[in-house]
Amino acid sequence: MDRKERTVFVTILINGLLILFKFWLSAASGSLALRSSAIHSLADLAIGVFVLIGLFLSRTKLAAAAQNGARAVENWVALLVSAAIFYVGLDIVGEVLAGEPPDLRNLGPITLASLVTVVVAYVIARYKLYVGRQTDSPALIASGYHSQVDIYASIVVVAGLGGAALGLENLDTAAAAIVVVMIFLSGFEIAAAAITALRHREQLQVEAEDAHGHLHSHGWFRIYAPIASLALIALYFLTGIYTVQPGEVAVVRRFGKVIEEAEPGMHYRWPSPIETVDVVALDLVRRIETGPLQMLTGDENLISVRASVQFSVGDASAFVLNVSAPDDLVLQAGVGALRQSVGEDAVDAVLTVDKTAIQEKAAKAAQASLDRSAAGIRIVGVQLLESAPPPEVADAFRDVASAREDRNTFVNEALAYRNEVLPTARGDADTARQAARAYAAEKLASSAGDAANFEARRQAYAAAPDITRQRLYLEAVEKSLAGAKKFVMDPTIIPQSTDLWITQPGKAQLLPPMQ
């Protein structure tokens, strides 16, 4: 292995380590630009491998031999590599056009660590150019110039990460879009070289000079640079297309100021950093649950409470501008409101009958707290999932609860007895009352009738005393002798004793003698 081959081999190893480092940084930060830069370095690694293969073939003079099969395999492998590079680039383009900012984290240390990638890319490029000029190797010089593109890509990535660390998260996406263009250019370079080699049935030369001493890579770069620039600009403006789903609203900000709230549908806004869009789901009910919390009741008892808070977005603009961690904000407001509500009631009420009232009061208090913060959040409800005494006094609370249940049992039995006896007593009282009223009415009516009868007889007596006296006498006799046998005797018969000769059934009876 001569100096040229050793140089390419060493740079391939360093480039491989650099690629692994970039992928690790991308995973640690969630940066789309770092992942794009790693893919670009992977393309540079593939080009280095093909250059090394070309140097080996040139040194062994296999290029002049009839090794068309080996050349064809190498060319087809190059085409597959370029296709893989294009596929990965299109995948990143899809993420860029999605318009969703990546979940970035650890931006400060990751940005500083990314500076190492710029230094390593610079060392690789300078090393290739130095050895290429020392050994008069056009392929190595061209590979060095190609590696300089990786320097620019690393600088763009560092700039994007730095901007994201300062609060402009969309700069990471913009940096990824720029690096994607470089990835497409590298893939095109490998594909063009492979197709040319297949057409002429010659050795693959990704980096070489033509008959006039010009580097191929820079020739096609001058041709396609304007096209790539226009494609980059078009890609930049396409990032302004966004879609709002039903039940969502998009808050559009221009340089940080809210200019509109877009309704569901497809819309367009100026690309970042001029305008940014935050899509907020208004119909989504979010739920956050507290852990077991020790709270003091109104009668100074300690209980353990666990609750959940359901909330949704009421004002999208206020939610986007004033809230950075909605779950934490709602959790703090809900816990504070719950402590206030529990502190206003006795422990018995909290554990048994007043849970619904406590939940309603806590929801109102939490909503008032969020309204004072202009958070744009609407509390749907607060639910007590668990309320129990501390373990140290749980047995005593259970005894109290059992006594309360016994008391409720006795009270319910007494109420049942009362409900059974009272209706009967009321019925008997009503019966006696109605009987008394009927008796009184009867006596009054009878007295009134007797008085009217007496008055009528008095008036008749006053009109005809003799006749009336005789009639009253007969009526009295008739009434007193009703049902008795009566004998009518001739007044000429004078009985000689006081015996009455009443006929006995079946016996002969002698009448007194007539005088």
Image (cartoon, rainbow, N blue to C red):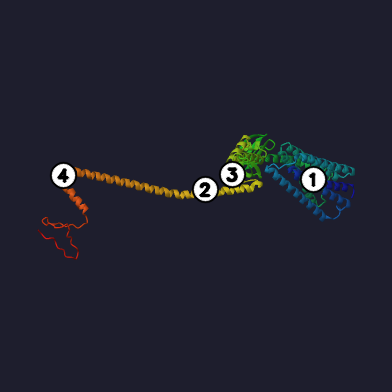
Which residue was labeled with disc 3? 348
Q: Residue at x 55, y 48 (%)?
A: 407
Which disc, if any, is residue 465? 4
| Tag 2: amino acid | Val
Secondary structure of the residue carrying tag 1 is: helix
- Residue 401 in sight here: yes
Residue sitting nearer the eye, 322 or 494: 494
| Tag 4: amino acid | Pro
Nearest to viewer (mark 4 / mark 2): 4
First reached walking from the N terminus: tag 4 or tag 3:
3
- Residue 321, by quadrant, is top right
CA–CA distance in space, label 4 to label 3: 93 Å
Report whether 15 appears left or right of 104. right
First reached walking from the N terminus: tag 1 or tag 4:
1
The reply to whether the C-beta atoms of the residues labelled 1 and 2 are less than 8 Å apart is no
Which residue was labeled with disc 1? 21
- Number of residues whose C-alpha sits closer than 10 Å to that of mark 3, classed few (under 14), some (14–19) or many (20 or more): some
